[in-house]
Image (cartoon, rainbow, N blue to C red):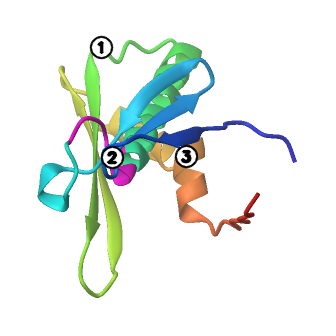
């Protein structure tokens, strides 16, 4: 198995705040103020939704390029829902600036269901944790 992504987080002095490094990129993570943080960066579930949204956008653009389709400008919105019973679901919306024909919409929904991050989220993962 090969590594396809890697990140690390360094704790910072403020509670809940950390410096994330991923490849050549650095950014902050934090908790919202209502949960005791300073809201200086995305919270963990924000990264999860951003991952799915960005993967969906990239996959749709790759599909459109391959099929020589001009999708125009669009956004991908992702919400993570959870309740006290630990039921969880993700809602994803693809919003096009211009109208998309019904037959193309069905093809694009099919593409969305097959993005790499979608597939990862839909199957079980083994997480192996070590203390070093």
Q: Quadrant of the C terminus?
A: bottom right
**Nearer the N terminus, badge 2 or badge 3?**
2
* Residue 40, position as x, y percentages in the image: 24, 35
Q: Is residue 42 magenta?
A: yes
**Nearer the N terminus, badge 1 or badge 3?**
1
Q: Does residue 31 appear anywhere in the picture?
A: yes
Task: Tell me: 22 left or right of 88.
Answer: right
**Which quadrant of the structure image shows residue 71?**
top left
Q: Does residue 114 appear anywhere in the picture?
A: no
User: Looking at the image, is 97 positioned above or below residue 22?
Assistant: above
Residue that numbered label 1 is attached to: 72
Q: Residue at the spot x=19%, y=50% of the render? A: 32
CB atoms at circles 2 and 3 under 8 Å apart?
no
Numbered badge on residue 117? 3
Q: Residue at the spot x=60%, y=43% of the render? A: 116
125 vs 113, nearest the viewer: 125
| Magenta part of the chain | 39-46
Instruction: Tell me the crowding category of disc 2: few under 14, some 14 to 19, or many 20 or more residues within 10 angstroms, Cα based.
Output: some
Residue that numbered label 2 is attached to: 46
8 vs 88, nearest the viewer: 8
The tally of labels here is 3
The label nearer to you, 2 versus 3, is 2
């Amino acid at each position: 198995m090969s590594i396809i992504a890697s990140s690390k987080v360094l704790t910072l002095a403020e509670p809940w705040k950390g410096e994330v490094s991923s490849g050549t990129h650095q950014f902050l993570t934090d908790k919202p103020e209502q949960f005791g943080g300073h809201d200086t960066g995305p919270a963990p579930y924000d990264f999860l939704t951003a991952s799915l949204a960005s993967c969906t956008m990239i996959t749709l653009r790759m599909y459109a390029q391959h099929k020589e389709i001009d999708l125009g400008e669009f956004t991908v919105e992702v919400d993570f829902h959870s309740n006290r019973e630990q039921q969880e679901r993700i809602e994803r919306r693809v919003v096009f600036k211009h109208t998309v024909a019904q037959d193309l919409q069905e093809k694009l929904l099919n593409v969305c269901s097959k993005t790499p991050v979608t597939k990862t989220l839909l199957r079980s993962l083994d997480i192996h944790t070590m203390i070093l």
